Image (cartoon, grey):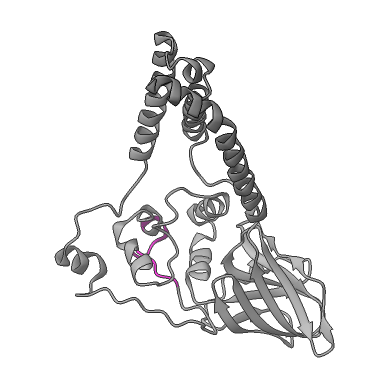
Amino acid sequence: MSSGYDTVDLLISSLWALGGSLAIFCLALSKKYFSTLNINSVTVLIYSGIIVGAAFQGWAYHSSQSRPWSLEWSQAVSNQLFEVPKIVSYKENPIERRPARKVIGGGSVDDILAARNSSPYNSCWYEGTFCLLGYNNLKLSIPHKTLYDALSSKVGGDDLLRFVSGSQQTLISKTGVSPLSLLGTSTNAPYISDVPEVSATPVLYQPGKVVYEVFTKEPVRVLENEIWWDGWTLELCDSEGCLPSIETKPNEFYLRYWDVPPGHWRAELTFHPKGSGASYMLAVAGLLILAIWMVWISVPLKRAITKFSV
């Protein structure tokens, strides 16, 4: 999953960081260092240059990143950006149905997209509100970039904007048929369907977990006005038990959808971040390597210090 960062710049920064780390490692493990504490001056200059270069390049890369929220803070700024005298964090958790997302920039799609990095989007973070764009979307991921391009389209962009920025809502069609044909329907109902005798009622909405009560007499496809991320799974349960969990899928705009067989179901969607297990394993492996390395160098380091002090 792309994070949206410029691949070349990020690769260069990573290579510099790797080079700096290797330079420190080689400098520490130099046999001459442990035996005589005298290092060849050219070697010192090379290693030091790599370390300083890595630090400077990292600082330059960090400084080049967008920070629309970096501004001098004052009460006047708060009033101007948020149109309130005091920021109040509003959190009602859990909730049954997500409210409409905050949109900044005017009424047209072009104006809203142009204000994607606007400072007023800070209120989304500080007030704990739901927002369509801004703040954490400075570096567009693949899902956000795909949705952004779809909104920029001159065909259907207004209907798509109304759908994704509105209150939590689902579009329901027959399985195998795209529910996007229902986008033109303007209503605040929790679900819109062209299939008779079907419903999808929101029950719970909280970070990492969304629950619906779904009833249908035939197989249907449910499309949410939520961005899909790898790791969202669906579990369908009825009075007789639960079906095996399945992965949700993205449509062409990277909105989340899932299929439901006939029945009366409790549809529970949960998010399980991909890669967290590998991250923990790498962290543990790194700590083990560090511990082994510290033990391994402790003896020659003590000898070198003793020799130097004598």
Q: Residue furthest right?
A: 240
Q: Viewer-proximal residue, 264 or 270?
A: 270
Quadrant in the rendering for residue 169: bottom right
Which residues are drawn in magenta?
Answer: 101-111
Main SS, magenta residues: loop
Look at 63% across and 46% down and name the residue there.
Answer: 282
- Is 295 above or below relative to 37? below
Residue 288, image x, y percentages: 62, 43
Look at 45% across and 64% down and name the residue there.
Answer: 132
Q: Viewer-proximal residue, 60 or 9?
A: 60
Is 162 placed left or right of 182 in the picture? Answer: left
Is 106 placed left or right of 30 in the picture? Answer: left
Question: Would you say residue 109 sits in the magenta stretch?
Answer: yes
Look at 50% across and 53% down and name the residue there.
Answer: 148
Residue 30, image x, y percentages: 52, 19
Look at 23% across and 71% down and name the residue there.
Answer: 83
Is 267 placed left or right of 110 in the picture? Answer: right
Residue 271 appearing in the image: yes
Is 194 placed left or right of 206 in the picture? Answer: right
Total numbered circles: 0
Residue 186, image x, y percentages: 52, 77
Residue 237, image x, y percentages: 77, 82
Q: Residue furthest front?
A: 310
Question: Would you say residue 255 sits in the magenta stretch?
Answer: no
- Is 269 above or below relative to 109? below
Q: Which quadrant of the figure contains the C terminus? A: top left
Q: Viewer-proximal residue, 114 or 232?
A: 232
Residue 105 appearing in the image: no
